[in-house]
Image (cartoon, coloured by chain):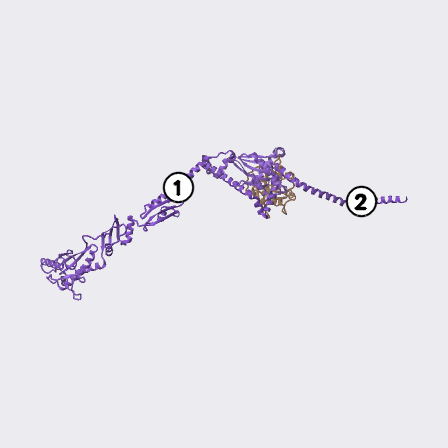
Chain colours: A purple, B brown
Amino acid sequence: MAEEPLARDTHVDAAHADAEFARLREMLFGREQRELEQLRARVAQLGFTSERLADELPRAIFRRTDRGDRQLAIALAPSVQQALSESVRKHPATIATAIFPILGPAIRKAIGEAMAGLVASVNTGIGQSLSLRGLQWRFEAWRTGVAYAQVVIRHSLVYRVEQVLLIHADTGLLLAHATSPDLVATDGDLISGMLTAIRDFVGDSFSSEREVGGLTSFKVGDLGVSVEPGPQAVLAAVVRGPAPPSLVIKLRETIESIHLRFADPLSKFEGDATPFEPSKELLADCLETVLQSDAHSGKRRVTWWPWIVGTVVLAAALALFLWRRASEWQRAVSRLETEPGIVLVHAERGWRRWRLSGLRDPLAARPAVLLAASGVDTARVDGRWQPYVSLDSTMVLDRARRQLAAPPAVALALRGDTLRARGVAPFSWVADMITLRVFPPGVSHLDLTGLALELTDAMRADIESVQRRRVLFAVASSRVSRQAQVAIDSNAVQLAAVDAALRTVGRRLEIALAGRADRTGLESLNQSLSADRAETVRVALLGGGIPAVSFTTQALGANAPLSETEASAPGASDVPRDVPYDAVAVRARVNRSVSFVVRVVRTIQAPTPER
Amino acid sequence: MIQKKVCMIGVFGAGKTSLVQQYVHSRFSEKYHSTVGVKIDRKSVDVDGDPMTLVLWDVAGKEADEDIPASYVRGAHGVIFVVDLTRRATWEELPALEALVQGAAGVIPTVIALNKADIPEQWAISVDEEQRLSALWTTVHTSAKSGQGVEDIFQTIARAVLKKPGTAA
């Protein structure tokens, strides 16, 4: 019995000790224990939230996208851009493979749109430039000094958002400003300040801004200002023309996006607008120009007449081009056909090249030179020319002059097949022509009757020698002395040689023998004496090779005495030079003589060479 | 570039517009034009090598029966009170104007232009009064007509709004 209380006591003591221990533990570690439990609970909750988030996030994105606003896209855009940029930088091949299937359609679409834009631009350009309205606008541009494009836009404008300003709501300071590229930039600082002041004034004038919604739009002439206020910033769009309702929605979305994206810079704004630079892209999205042609693009009919005009102009240009090509061809062919020495056998005009072939005299002009002189581009001409001898008179004359080596003083002319020579020709050339056996092609006869003969130096020397030499006679005598015979023989030899040579070229000598007497005695006797002396010499010359018909005699008596110069010329008399000069005696001696006067005349029938 | 909104506050005819015209456009007109509402101008300045833009709100002067609209002052970074030394009323209105500004924009850098300093013989404020004012605020003697102190006062407010050392509180 004594052991039961002990057991009960032992059990009570143990329970008491546990309680005490728990209290002690609570006192020592209670706070840490609770914090540990809270941390475990938060960790468990975090794990749960991440898993839930993975499930909920796609649904949340879908729901937000279904709302149709751009907020989610704008919020994600910077991160997506950054991620895409990073991915392209690190793995360009992956991105290239991924977008490859859409590249082709995208390029085709872009080209298609560009072509459609070009057609529309041509339509508009032709339409405006040729229409009365276009001319009026050009006149207006000239009168006002405004660019023509600006005038066109002004008249065909439905509306244009020219400027968009982002303004800090409290200070009225400009945060960002976007302007249409073709407009002169205005002072955005002043505009934003005045706009804020106007809004403040309106707000103050019409009680609380919240009650009336503030100033949302106003007009100044053609310009209207649409204002979309936000909690910390205001968006103002300067619009020319009536702004469509869609613009208000666009401005609202933009100011919301700006508040979402630039919430931090807006709340901390202290005058530095630098953080708002990126917002210019959003502002620029609001800039737009809508022309009448754009506004009616959906129901626009195709304007045919500009195309017809364009086609007619093109056709006219093509016809002009073809006509000029044909004229050029005709001119070239005609030039070749009329050129002496060229026979055009085949002429073919291709689209890009001309083919010409035929015969060409080597002396004729070069076809390429002729075509170039006619304005033809010889680079596109293929020519094939076979050599031949042309009987064209120009070619015959040219060839004859070259072949016969005609002297410069000789002019050649062709009459029928007779080649006529005119002018002065040397004896040797005439002699060659007389003996010519091979005539140039196209020449059958050679007519030299028009030529004057130029004697050789030897012939001239012989004739002069003969004319200087006198056959002297004794006083009152007509008998030929031995000395006179020598003079006659010498002259006979020289004259015969010259005469023989001249006869080969259709010429001969004509020799006049002038008999004289000195002054002594009666003149009648002197006349008779001089005639006898001339006749004596003529008879003495006969048989020397010169036909008798070539001689004539003349009795001069004492009435035509030789001059002193003639009398004192070398060979004129037989008086030695060292004998003292007795002028009277010498003169009388010299005048008892017969002198020779020689002329070259044509023979009755001149030889005419023939082939 | 940093922009700061600075309001020109004062009684009508104190010379606010003339000071701004002299500062921004370097011109002065004897002819008085009362400002209607507010006129805004802008001037780029260089403060110790830091470029900034002062957007000057030339607020229409306070008249006896009409207060300055507080909304024009809201968001201002600094204020220039313009006192016409020849008109005592412009000096006496200072406390009320200061209270209006503080109510709309809080405590912001403030400079007081003591205008028409070029005609001391016509001053209506004693030297003692002026000294008491200078003990409380940063003051600058100005004359829109002669240009005296014009550059100085705008430089002073520019330094103050940029919180440069040694500037007005």
Q: Is residue A223 above or below residue A508?
A: above
Whole-percent x, y for residue A343 in the image: 32, 47
Which residue is identified by label 2?
A: A22
Q: Residue at x 74, y 45 (%)?
A: A36
Work out whether residue A358 can be spotted: yes
Characterize the local packing of mark 2: few (<14), some (14-19) or many (20 or more) Cα atoms within 10 angstroms.
Answer: few
Q: On the picture, is B47 further left or further right than A592?
A: right
Task: Please state which of residues A458 and A447 is positioned toward the viewer in this rendering.
Answer: A447
Residue B92 occupies quadrant: top right
- Closer to the eye: label 1 or 2: 1
Residue A67 occupies quadrant: top right
Q: On the picture, is A458 further left or further right than A354?
A: left
Image quadrant occupied by the N terminus of chain A: top right
In primary-sequence order, the first of circles 1 and 2 is 2
Mark drawn on residue B32: none
Kind of residue sitting beneath label 1: Leu
**Residue lying farthest right?**
A1
Whole-percent x, y for residue B53 in the image: 58, 44
Whole-percent x, y for residue B148 in the image: 58, 44
- Chain under callout 2: A
Kind of residue sitting beneath label 2: Ala
Q: On the picture, is A120 further left or further right than A430?
A: right
Task: Please state which of residues A526 and B46 is positioned toward the viewer in this rendering.
Answer: A526
Task: Please state which of residues B86 and B148 is positioned toward the viewer in this rendering.
Answer: B148
Secondary structure type for disc 2: helix
Secondary structure type for disc 1: helix
In this figure, what is the number of numbered marks?
2
Pointers 1 and 2 in contact (C-beta within 8 Å): no
Whole-percent x, y for residue A256 in the image: 61, 38
Which residue is identified by label 1?
A: A322
